[in-house]
């Protein structure tokens, strides 16, 4: 949308949405601006920042030390800790205790499912990733198998395992299958004896020495007792970086994660793109079973579809499909640069579709929306679908859309331009001079509303990183969320960040010597 035709818009995100008035010439003025003049303006603004209180992080950022994920060589991932154990031993409570926030679902009912199974955690200055196996689905006839299978999936991508046992109950039949699998896995195992709420109950924990996993660590996930000692030991066991996975960033084909809810057509599309039956396709949802790393020729170039299965999966594992789908999705996103989210055009957009889409956005990857089975739609369904997209996908209206058929390959040639567009936005950096000229023009045309008699000013802006683009604004006060969204929207319109999430954050700074 051209800035000369930029009119007042309606609120789309609530009462705090910033609604600009009139038109402006921001894009045209920036396009006509000489690079040298833009840099001179930025240098003047940068010099003005020296009057403000800046810390070491500010200095590093302003010196141009980008924090991109690197363009050459492998990127080392945080070590991975799998937390496993049968239902009702307190895994989710322990996960929340470790994270320091309520993330995992905690209920008295065994087998409460949840969407996210991987969490970023930190202890004593070190980052690590938790894989929580609490998302299994209750199946009374095969409950023991369900627990063991899910544990096996988590252990495959883990550097170490935290095996949680109820100290008052001890090892049960459900635990035995898990214990056998753990011994075969040869992964380091840390035994946590949970529900040890006081010293008198520690005797129950000592009995678990007999399981053969070394010293049991008595903890109370509910009250926090012993958790610090447990985490200290976990840090001793975990490697500095994951030994299971690294991300190869040494150039070569761009990496694509093809994601979507089970049975939406991911395997069919991959087979059609690859020109071979490389992936198991079955009407039973969730039958992808082998990790898939496909190099596929599209548009005269090679592309790498990374681990679209993400984790080994046996065909009989029908129960707990949500857990496996979520784990596969997150594992694939970790290794990818762009996410292609496959949606079924002939079905109403589901909650699971929206959740998977949110995972892709949160991962910071470039994004393409692919609507499968579009060729089967009649005019009425297409009209309804457009309304659904407008209503439910308004927050990703920046993502390129392609309408395809995974079964026949219809319109698959349109995938490459969409991927190129999304990756171009994801990789993009804006010169500091041009960015600050844009901010100056935008604020002059559409100033931030006055709040409590004060109007925050933007002192200086810089792009902290790309992949995805992250911008930091030094300001004299807090910018309303609606105004930040307005800046983000106009960044897209002016510089063409199509297909990538953008993060705009603030650093509120005061003048030196000013009383707080």
Image: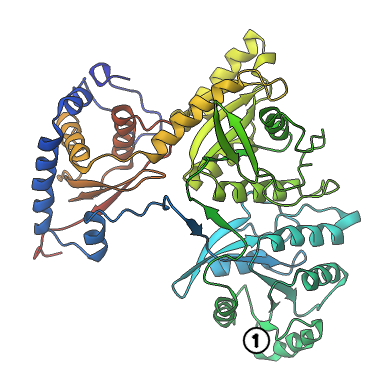
Q: Is residue 225 visible?
A: no
Task: Residue 372: give x, y in percent of width and height.
Answer: 65, 24
Q: In terms of depth relative to the viewer, which is nearer, 456 or 311?
A: 311
Task: Residue 238: give x, y in percent of width and height.
Answer: 58, 73
Look at the image and tell me in which quarter the C terminus lies.
bottom left
Q: Number of marks in the image?
A: 1
Q: In terms of depth relative to the viewer, which is nearer, 476 or 435?
A: 435
> Which residue does the image show at 20% across and 26% down from the upper left?
31
Label 1 element class = loop
Q: Quadrant of residue 203?
A: bottom right
Q: Quadrant of residue 437?
A: top left
453 up-or-down from 153: above or below: above
**With 284 as the anchor, is 205 left or right in this view?**
left
**With 180 as the anchor, is 499 left or right in this view?**
left
Task: Residue 373: give x, y in percent of width and height.
Answer: 68, 21
Judged from this view, the residue extending furthest toward the top is 379
> Which residue does the image show at 74% across and 31% down from the upper left?
276
> Which residue does the image show at 28% across and 28% down from the upper left?
494
Q: In terms of depth relative to the viewer, which is nearer, 36 or 425?
A: 36
296 up-or-down from 215: above or below: above
> Which residue does the image show at 85% across and 73% down from the upper left?
172
Q: Dot 1, crowdedness within 10 Å: few (<14), some or many (≥20)?
A: few
Look at the image and tell me in which quarter the N terminus lies.
top left
Residue at the spot of label 1: 198
98 up-or-down from 466: above or below: below
Q: Quadrant of residue 414?
A: top right
Task: Residue 469: give x, y in percent of width and height.
Answer: 36, 43
């Amino acid at each position: 949308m051209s800035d000369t035709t930029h009119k007042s818009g309606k609120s789309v995100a609530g009462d705090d949405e910033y609604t600009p008035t009139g038109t402006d010439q921001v894009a045209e003025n920036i396009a006509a601006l000489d690079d040298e003049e833009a840099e001179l303006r930025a240098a003047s603004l940068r010099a003005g920042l020296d009057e403000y209180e800046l810390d070491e992080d500010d200095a590093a950022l302003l010196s141009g030390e980008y924090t991109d994920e690197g363009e050459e060589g492998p990127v080392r991932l945080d070590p991975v800790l799998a937390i496993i154990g049968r239902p009702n031993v307190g895994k989710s409570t322990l996960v929340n205790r470790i994270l320091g926030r309520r993330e995992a679902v905690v209920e008295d009912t065994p087998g409460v499912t949840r969407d996210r199974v991987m969490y970023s955690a930190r202890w004593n200055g070190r980052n690590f990733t938790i894989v929580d196996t609490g998302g299994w689905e209750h199946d009374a006839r095969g409950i023991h198998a369900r627990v063991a299978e899910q544990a096996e999936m988590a252990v495959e991508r883990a550097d170490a395992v935290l095996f949680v046992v109820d100290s008052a109950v001890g090892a049960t039949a459900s635990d035995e299958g898990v214990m056998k699998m753990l011994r075969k896995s040869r992964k380091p195992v840390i035994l946590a004896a949970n529900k040890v709420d006081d010293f008198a109950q520690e005797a129950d924990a000592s009995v678990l020495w007999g399981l053969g996993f070394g010293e049991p660590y008595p903890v109370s996930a509910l009250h926090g007792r012993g958790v610090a000692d447990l985490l200290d030991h976990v840090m001793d066991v975990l490697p500095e970086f994951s030994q299971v996975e690294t991300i190869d960033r040494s150039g070569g084909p761009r990496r694509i994660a093809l994601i979507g809810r089970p049975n939406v057509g991911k395997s069919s599309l991959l087979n059609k793109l690859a020109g071979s039956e490389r992936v198991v396709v079955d009407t039973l949802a969730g039958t992808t079973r082998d990790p898939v790393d496909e190099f596929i020729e599209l548009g005269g170039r090679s592309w790498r579809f990374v681990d679209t299965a993400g984790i080994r999966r046996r065909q009989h594992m029908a129960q707990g499909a949500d857990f496996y789908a979520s784990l596969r999705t997150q594992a694939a996103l970790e290794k990818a640069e762009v996410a292609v989210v496959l949606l079924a055009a002939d079905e109403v957009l589901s909650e699971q579709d929206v959740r998977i889409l949110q995972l892709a956005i949160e991962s910071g990857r470039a994004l393409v929306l692919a609507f499968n089975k579009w060729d089967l739609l009649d005019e009425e369904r297409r009209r309804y679908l457009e309304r659904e997209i407008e209503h439910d996908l308004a927050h990703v209206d920046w993502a390129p859309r392609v309408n395809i058929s995974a079964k026949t390959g219809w319109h698959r040639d349109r995938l490459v331009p969409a991927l190129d567009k999304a990756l171009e936005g994801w990789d993009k950096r804006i010169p500091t001079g041009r960015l600050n000229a844009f901010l100056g023009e935008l604020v002059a045309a559409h100033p931030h509303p006055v709040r409590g008699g004060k109007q925050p000013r933007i002192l200086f802006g810089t792009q902290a990183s790309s992949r995805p683009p992250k911008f930091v604004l030094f300001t004299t006060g807090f910018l309303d969320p609606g105004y930040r969204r307005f800046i983000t929207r106009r960044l897209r319109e002016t510089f063409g960040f199509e297909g990538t999430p953008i993060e705009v954050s603030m650093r509120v700074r005061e003048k030196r010597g000013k009383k707080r």
